[in-house]
Amino acid sequence: MLAQLDQTPVTLEAGANFDAAEARVRQARVRPNPVLGLDVENAYGSGPYSGMNNADTTLALSTDLDLWGRRTSRIAAARAEAGAVGLQRDLAVVDAAGRLALVYAEAEVAQRRATLAEETLSLTVADARAALALVEEGREPLLRGIQGEAEAASARAALDEAQAERDAAYARLTAVAMIPAPVTSIEASLLDAPPTTTVSAANDAPTVRVAEAQRTAAERRIDVQRAQARPDINASVGIRRFEAEDATALTFGISMPLPLFDRNRGNIEAAQAEFRAADARLLTARQEAQADRAAAVARLAASVSRVRAADGGVTAAEEAYRLSRIGFEAGRISQIELRVTRTALVNARSAAVDARLARVRAEIDLARLNGRAPFEGAQ
């Protein structure tokens, strides 16, 4: 499933954005196109200038010299933008891997809940039959048998609901993972997979790297605007034909705008303000990454302890139910006490599943902060 992440819509969009950024880098390297011009003077006038006999024709080629570091700053800004987009693409892949892991784990949880519902139904039916047997023997009132049948009916309804949730989770997994055939069961367990304890520095978080790249790109845009503030130098060379003298001559020219009014100050100040905003976002990203990593590590440690405690609770609940069942069949324990121990067993098993899902969620959060796929090594 991880190998197919590059075919998901999110990663395809991120890859297309990166391709566009790379194309802008190539475009930034391109020099301005030259301009070919043809000028005709002293033609179609009056007197000696009627017609084209005394016309002066000039064919000239002019181009922007692209001076003052314009091209260099333009390329550097495009590269910085492409670097930021590339990191965003990597972050999108990590997010897609986390979403896939969560959907997979939720499907596995739904499968386990359906299995638990089947087991609960079996236990409830068995207890109801035992209660009916005691009712027939006169050891329990008829009400106990009716209660047992009602509990069995409720367990059947819970099973139907759990199976419907399981099928819906399978459908979601099939869609998210883009699997050709519908998912009908989950063999490889993610809930029982041990979490990865690799922890990287806060500055290595993908969100921090993206913010750093965006800050660099904003700084490069300041250089671009400063270069744009310098005047454009345009040079031209051409050839002129004098029809009256039947002669030709070369022409040379250079032009530049006078920066009397427009000095690009507004764009420079806007780029500087955007840089300050990017710098503030970087500071926020570092603070959030540090806090989120500490919280994720704490949640992962707590979830691991919760899983161990939940497994211990399941073992104790199973033993308590076994003993209660023996005591109930021997007539030493009432049906109410048996129902309490059965409910405790069902709740303990459900709590164990919830604990494992919480551990998966904590691993997904920590993996995203470390820039890797969940349950995978550092990437």
Image: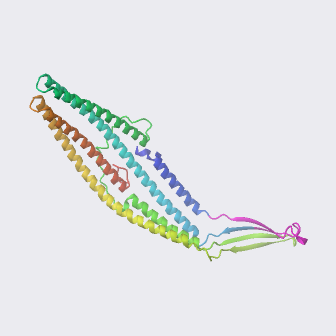
Is 48 inside the magenta-drawn segment?
yes
Snapshot quadrant of residue 252? bottom right
Q: Is residue 29 above or below residue 187?
A: below
Residue 13: x %, y % from top left: 49, 50
Q: Is residue 335 magenta?
A: no
Report the side of 18 relative to 98 (left or right): right
- Location of the N terminus (image quadrant): top left
Q: Quadrant of residue 119?
A: top left
- The structure's colour scheme is rainbow
Q: Look at 24% across and 52% down and name the residue there.
A: 302
- Residue pictured at 35% horizontal, 49% vertical: 374
Q: Position of residue 4 (x, y in %)?
A: 44, 44
Residue 105 placement, left or right of 177: left
Residue 126 visible (yes or no): no
In the rendered view of the protein, which quadrant contains the C terminus? bottom left
User: Residue 315: percent from the left, percent from the top?
Assistant: 18, 40
Q: Pick out the residue farthest to the top.
A: 136
Q: How many marks?
A: 0
Above or below, 89 against 43 in this view is above
Residue 69, percent across and down? Answer: 57, 71
Q: Is residue 192 above or below residue 276?
A: above
Who's the residue at 32% across and 35% down the image? 161
254 w.r.t. 160: above or below: below
Asked whether the viewer can see residue 67, the reply is yes
Which residue extends farthest left? Answer: 332
Q: Which residues are magenta?
A: 31-59
In the foreground, 281 or 105 = 281
Residue positioned 33% across, 40% down in the render: 108
Q: Is residue 22 left or right of residue 97?
A: right
